[in-house]
Amino acid sequence: MSFIPVAAPVIGEREIAYVTDAIHSGWVSSMGPYIGRFEGEFARYVGVSHAITVSNGTVGLYLALHSLGIGPGDEVLVPDLTFVATAHAVLQVGATPVFVDVEPDTWCIDPLAAERAITPRTRAIIPVHLYGHPADMNAILNLAHQHDLLVVEDAAEAHGAEVNQQRVGSLGKVGVFSFYGNKIMTTGEGGMLTTNDVDLAQRMRFLKDHGMSPARRYYHAELSFNFRMTNLQAALGLAQLEQIEGFIARKRDIYGWYADALSQIPCLQMPVSRPGVRNVFWLFSIVLGQSCRLSRTDFGLALQEHEIDWRPFFVPMHQLPHLSKFRMVGRDGESCPVSERLGGRGLNLPSGCALDEPTVRRIADTVARLACTGDR
Ligand SMILES: *Cc1c(COP(=O)(O)O)cnc(C)c1O
């Protein structure tokens, strides 16, 4: 048996054909027809009127916040359990992150804790659809409405996930997607911003491309950026997007194969799908309960001995040295006990779309044995 990675991309003949076509066309930078086609198809897929390519998800988050005018003096609510880019984007625009505890079942930002974290300075909230499960957008949109907050969806891990049949990235003011190599679909590096707000879309397009006046070439009236995607990446992205429903179907199958073997094991917490939600199961994940015989470290070592790759859950933001000075808020006060438990006990297991059923069932059997007996 060879090493089984956590999330290898699936890239085939369609990708090769489109990228080859882009190379032959000579349009290798950020002009060229694949950019517009990819943006148009992605907007249609998400169900928004505008989609804007960017170089990666991290600058996408930055550009969204910056374009919304969020900056020094503003507080932004960020889940304590997320990839660090969510918090970094807030800091990079000069705003202050406030770390909010997550829900024990969905692992996404807890709306009750978020409500407690609101102050007169709170301007925005960034729900992260962690590992493919949408955050509780009904509650978050209500909260945002009551307190006049901007909602920036970090949908980097949840392409195609839905709440009440609406796709994530279409629910807040702006959605941010990543196309890093391990995400649900990839462009190598890349990202996309989605919005129904025409003015915001225009502003993000303007700022990502050196802020050049549409009317006068080389006339730049404000500090701006180069956050463009290339036509080559967009060609890869379009080919991937045309297959995304197949990728998601496979992710959901992988969840089902794992669940067959693991859902009855009392010491393992499984991913949930809340009613009305489409979970796209970006990474199949488990959380080790108190009664589990192995620590996460030993669990991971045992998986490695079986050549099964794994990842620990993200380290909670408040535990990172440069972020520990910021306020954190849970349901019961200034702490994030749920995120701490999950961050210390959660594991992501192999979830790439190239995995077949026998392989997943074999991994699941190994995980079940480790969890039940501790026998490596
Ligand atoms: C991957 C990811 C990002 C950043 O995307 P990049 O394209 O790698 O910059 C942001 N937020 C979350 C939650 C992510 O998982």
Image (tube, grey):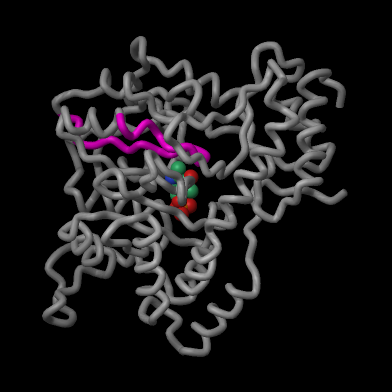
Determine whether 8 is above or below 121 in the image.
below
Count of numbered tags: 0
Range drawn in magenta: 121-138
In x, y percent, where is residue 363? 78, 38
Q: Nearer the viewer, residue 184 or 27?
A: 184
In x, y percent, where is residue 345? 61, 23
Determine whether 270 is above or below 228 in the image.
above
What residue do we see at 65% from left, 53% from top? 353
What residue do we see at 34% from left, 61% from top? 43
Image-based side of 17 in relation to 332, left or right? right
Image-based side of 101 in relation to 16, left or right? left
122 is within the stretch colored magenta:
yes
In x, y percent, where is residue 73? 17, 35
Determine whether 81 is above or below 34 in the image.
above
Q: Nearer the viewer, residue 357 or 172?
A: 357
Viewer can see residue 298: yes
Image-based side of 220 in relation to 286, left or right? left
What residue do we see at 16% from left, 28% from top? 146
Image quarter of the C terminus: top right
Among the 4 quarters of the image, the one containing residue 138: top left
Q: Nearer the viewer, residue 165 or 198?
A: 165
What residue do we see at 27% from left, 54% from top? 195
Among the 4 quarters of the image, the one containing residue 224: bottom left
291 is within the stretch colored magenta:
no
